[in-house]
Every structure is written in C-alpha cells, then in structure tokens.
Image (spheres, rainbow, N blue to C red):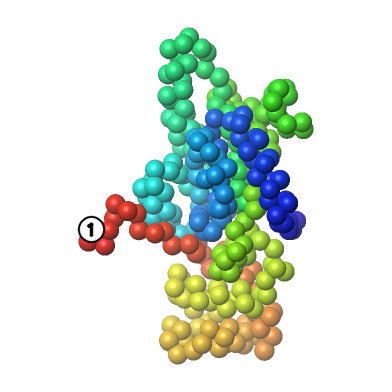
C-alpha cells in the first residue's frame, strides 16, 4: 500500500477537491470499513457533503461480524442516515445500494416529470479514507457495461463520468480523505484492519492492543489460534499473553515476530470475522426496552 502522509496542506487540498467534485453529483457515497464503521469515517464528511444526499456503505461486510453490522445499520438509521452493508470485492449488496439510490432520487424524478423534463442518470461520487474499497466499488459498478462518457463542462480536467447502465453516472476518481489520527485507539484499529501504514506504529503495541480487543470480541478464536486458555485472560497480563503466544508459535522470545504474525493473521482472516467499533445503542433502544 502506498503510504500517504497527511499534512494540513494536503488535508485542505483534499477537502477543497472533494467539495469541488461534490457540486456535480446528486448523491455522495461515503465508503467505510464495516469492521470499524466509525473509526474509518473522515471527521469532516458532514461538513464537506453540505446538504447533498448522502449514503454510507459499510464495505468489506464479508470481514465484519454480521450481528455488529446489523447494530450499526440500525444505529445509523436511527440517526436518519441511509446505510447499506456491501462487499465491493464480489458485488454482494450492490443491487440494494442501487435500488436505494433510485429511491433517494424519487422526489427529483417526480419534480422533473411534472416539468416535463426527461430523467437523466443519477450522478454519483464515492469518497472515504484510503483503503476502504473506493476503487473496488468503482470497478464493480462499471463492470460489464463499461462505457466512458465524454468530458463534460464543469468536470475537473482529467476526470470523467463513468456510465453505469442508463441509470447512473459515477465520477471516475474517488474523493480521498484523510483518516482520523488524533486518537491512539482509532489509529490502532485502522492499523489492524490495514487502513493505515504499519510502520507508523510499533507492531508489538498493535499486538498488545489487538489481544485486548480480541479477548472481548472473539476470545475463543484467540485461544484456538494460539493455544491459549480463557483462564490465561483472567490470570495473565496482556504482555504475558503475548509472550505465551510467542512461545506457542515456536518463536522463542521473539515477540516482534509473533506480533507481526498475529496482526497478519487477523488481517488475513485467520481469526474470523470481527468488528472493532461497537455500535452505540440507538436512541430508540434504551436500556429499559
Ligand atoms: P481505496 O483505497 O479506498 O480505493 O481501496 P481499494 O479499492 O484499493 O481496496 C483496498 C483493499 O480492500 C483491496 O485489497 C481490495 O481488494 C479490498 N477490498 C475492497 N472491497 C472489499 C470487500 O468487499 N471485501 C474484502 N474482503 N476486501 C475488499
């Protein structure tokens, strides 16, 4: 993965560019990683999108815990946000996303019909932090009937609309925004899911954090993969658990190597589907319910 270092100047430019592109579109699709729906949101999307129609896609749903995906969907819906889980990689969920976008545009379609204006394709752009699957989404959308429309006025030089059937047009470059990085925990979560570059963080710190998290979200899988017992979690410190994992992996006391293996295992799906951001309880579902 190409590392992007975000400095204030780059952030201002990315924001400006995203706002510029947004002028042309009907719906902005905010792509996040379903394993870390909040941590992988850019803090300024709300401000950047202004009053444009907006949809969140929880991408990489195949990697996230299905129960947690449901909770996140009901949470965002409780906030009045249109949200769908999908898998850009194999296209699962894309039809619902398309149907939902058509529904979002219904008021405009009706307005146009009243004025006798022929409906035009729905114009879209996708935006989000690096590595959440924006390019994969674009490729998935245009698969099969790829046709590139001519440059139109108002489109930034070098940018094109990709035609998706007769119903949609999608800007060919995504809006790339910076990840949240003020918070150490968010940084760890993004690094575990592979959204930010490894070398920005120490692997052993990352592994210690991941042990703590997996003790909560999937203790049995952690035990199985590294021959631990649930008693270990009660009795040992996280650092001692890492040392035990190191020994069990046959790496003697090379816990750097074990840390790296552990993180790669998580990213490679060896510990199964997981979600690291827990959905807040929707306002409509209070504790008394
Ligand atoms: P971008 O930086 O946001 O444009 O992200 P990419 O489209 O380059 O995707 C980053 C990585 O995530 C690639 O390795 C993709 O194959 C992978 N990816 C994208 N969508 C999915 C998905 O739905 N499931 C899984 N498992 N991986 C995905």
Q: Is residue 214 left or right of residue 176?
A: left
The residue drawn where x is 56% and y is 53% is 43
Residue 51 percent coordinates (x, y): 50, 36
Residue 178 percent coordinates (x, y): 65, 53
The residue drawn where x is 52% and y is 35% is 52
| Number of numbered labels in the structure image | 1
Q: Is residue 183 left or right of residue 223?
A: right
Q: Is residue 1 above or below residue 103?
A: below
Residue 38 percent coordinates (x, y): 50, 56
Q: Is residue 184 above or below residue 60?
A: below
Q: Is residue 91 left or right of residue 200?
A: left
Q: Residue furthest top?
A: 116
Residue position for label 1:
289
Q: Nearer the viewer, residue 92 or 5?
A: 5
Q: Quadrant of the N terminus?
A: bottom right
The residue drawn where x is 73% and y is 31% is 156
Look at the image and tell me whether residue 264 can be seen: yes
């Amino acid at each position: 993965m190409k590392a992007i270092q975000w400095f204030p100047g780059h952030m201002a430019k990315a924001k400006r560019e995203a706002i510029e592109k947004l002028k042309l579109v009907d719906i902005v699709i905010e792509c996040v990683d379903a394993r870390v729906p909040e941590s992988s949101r850019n803090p300024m999307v709300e401000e950047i999108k202004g009053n444009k129609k907006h949809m969140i896609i929880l991408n990489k749903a195949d990697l996230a815990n299905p129960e947690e995906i449901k909770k996140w969907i009901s949470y965002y819906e409780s906030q009045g946000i249109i949200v769908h889980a999908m898998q850009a990689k194999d296209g699962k969920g894309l039809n619902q996303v398309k149907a939902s976008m058509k529904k979002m545009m219904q008021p405009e379609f009706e307005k146009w019909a009243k004025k006798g204006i022929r409906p035009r394709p729905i114009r879209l752009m996708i935006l989000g932090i690096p590595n959440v699957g924006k390019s994969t989404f674009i490729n998935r959308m245009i698969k099969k009937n790829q046709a590139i429309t001519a440059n139109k006025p108002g489109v930034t030089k070098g940018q094109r609309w990709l035609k998706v059937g007769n119903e949609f047009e999608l800007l060919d470059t995504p809006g790339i925004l910076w990840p949240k990085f003020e918070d150490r925990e968010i940084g760890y979560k993004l690094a575990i899911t592979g959204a930010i570059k490894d070398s920005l963080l120490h692997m052993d710190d990352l592994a210690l954090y991941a042990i703590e998290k997996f003790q909560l979200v999937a203790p049995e899988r952690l035990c199985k993969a590294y021959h631990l017992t649930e008693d270990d979690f009660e009795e040992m410190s996280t650092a001692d658990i890492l040392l035990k994992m190191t020994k069990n992996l046959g790496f003697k006391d090379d816990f750097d190597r074990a840390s790296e293996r552990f993180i790669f295992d998580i990213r490679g799906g060896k510990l199964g589907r997981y979600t690291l951001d827990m959905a807040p309880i929707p306002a409509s579902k209070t504790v008394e319910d």
